[in-house]
């Protein structure tokens, strides 16, 4: 009798254990919402893992976030997104990087649950509807203070700002070539043309000839050669240089006045 009771008790315990494990495996099935990235840690000592080539309409999208090298194994941080309802195994979406067969790769099963996705959508909607209301006309006061600050800044920059100093008077314009030639002619006729004035007159006369022959920015030696070889100016240049640089020059002052006089008239603009 005692033995029979013991058998009944043992049978009851075994049945309870079986029911527990069956119920536990059903309740503990990993269920994940659709469209939300999940994480899984997989340890594998075989060849380097890679994600299987993507196929259109695949149920699970997988990526390898990080690989940690250990002495005899690798630890993979895997991220996956379930796209539709059903039960899937993560290892079905992994391949060996070198193309070899995967042996001993642990199974990692999970279930895509649309019900969780609906609950998640509800939670997101509830979160988005939450808002913080700031009372006391906060935004109106902030707008007013901003306008006041901008107005104060503009007053600080522009109010009673000193005017820039006036540009200094450039003075009278420099004399033209014709004006200088008239001055030299007057001194020549009055007999007051000294050595310094003669040197200046020579430079002004050469500048007049450069303008007349349109020599522009040619060097002085080249310009002087053109003036000496030109039919209009060659004879006048010889007279001027002989009169200036030879104290006993037979060239009369009247001839020099005749050379200068045409250039005392302002050129037509």
Image (spheres, grey):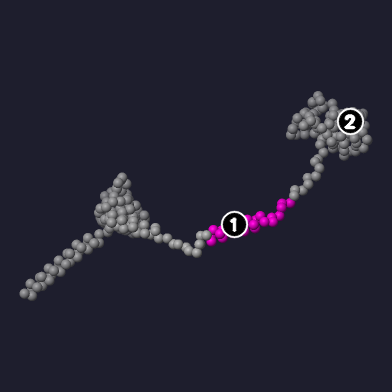
Asked whether the beta carbons under mark 1 and mark 2 sit within 8 Å of each other, the answer is: no
Q: Position of residue 125 (x, y in %)?
A: 36, 57
Q: Quadrant of the C terminus?
A: top right
The residue stretch that appears in magenta: 141-165
Most distant residue in the top direction? 231
Q: Position of residue 161 (x, y in %)?
A: 69, 55
Q: Is residue 127 above or below residue 58?
A: below
Q: Label for residue 257?
A: 2
Front residue (pair 68, 86): 86
Q: Is residue 118 magenta?
A: no
Badge 2: few (under 14), some or many (20 or more) residues near its Cα, within 10 Å?
some
Front residue (pair 262, 131): 131
Task: Identify the residue shown where x is 92% and y is 37%.
Answer: 192
Of the image marks 1 and 2, the number of the one nearer the N terminus:
1
Mark count: 2
Task: Identify the residue shown where x is 12% and y is 68%.
Answer: 11
Most distant residue in the left direction? 1
Query: Which residue bears the numbered disc 1?
Result: 150
Q: Tell me which secondary structure the magenta stretch mostly adopts.
A: helix
The residues tagged by marks 1 and 2 sit, at their Cα atoms, a distance apart of: 74 Å
Local SS, label 1: helix
| 66 relative to 190 in the view: left or right | left
Q: Position of residue 139 (x, y in %)?
A: 51, 60
């Amino acid at each position: 009798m005692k033995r029979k009771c013991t058998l009944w008790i043992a049978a009851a315990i075994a049945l309870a254990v079986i029911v527990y494990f069956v119920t536990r495996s059903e309740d503990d099935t990993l269920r994940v919402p659709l469209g939300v990235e999940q994480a899984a840690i997989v340890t594998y000592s075989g060849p380097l893992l890679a994600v299987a080539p993507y196929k259109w309409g695949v149920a699970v999208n997988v990526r390898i976030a990080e690989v940690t090298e250990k002495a005899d194994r690798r630890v993979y941080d895997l991220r996956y997104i379930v796209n539709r309802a059903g039960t899937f195994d993560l290892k079905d979406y992994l391949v060996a990087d070198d193309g070899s067969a995967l042996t001993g790769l642990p199974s990692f099963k999970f279930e895509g649950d649309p019900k969780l996705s609906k609950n998640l959508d509800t939670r997101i909607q509830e979160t988005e509807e939450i808002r913080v209301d700031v009372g006391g006309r906060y935004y109106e006061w902030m707008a007013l203070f901003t306008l006041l600050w901008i107005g104060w800044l503009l007053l600080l920059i522009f109010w009673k700002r000193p005017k820039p100093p006036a540009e200094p008077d450039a003075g009278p314009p420099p004399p033209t070539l014709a004006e200088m030639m008239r001055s030299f002619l007057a001194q020549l006729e009055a007999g007051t043309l000294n050595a310094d004035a003669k040197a200046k007159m020579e430079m002004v006369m050469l500048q007049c000839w450069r303008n007349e022959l349109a020599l522009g920015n040619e060097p002085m030696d080249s310009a002087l050669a053109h003036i000496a070889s030109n039919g209009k100016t060659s004879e006048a240049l010889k007279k001027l240089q002989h009169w200036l640089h030879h104290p006993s020059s037979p060239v009369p002052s009247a001839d020099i006045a005749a050379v200068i006089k045409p250039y005392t008239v302002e050129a037509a603009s």
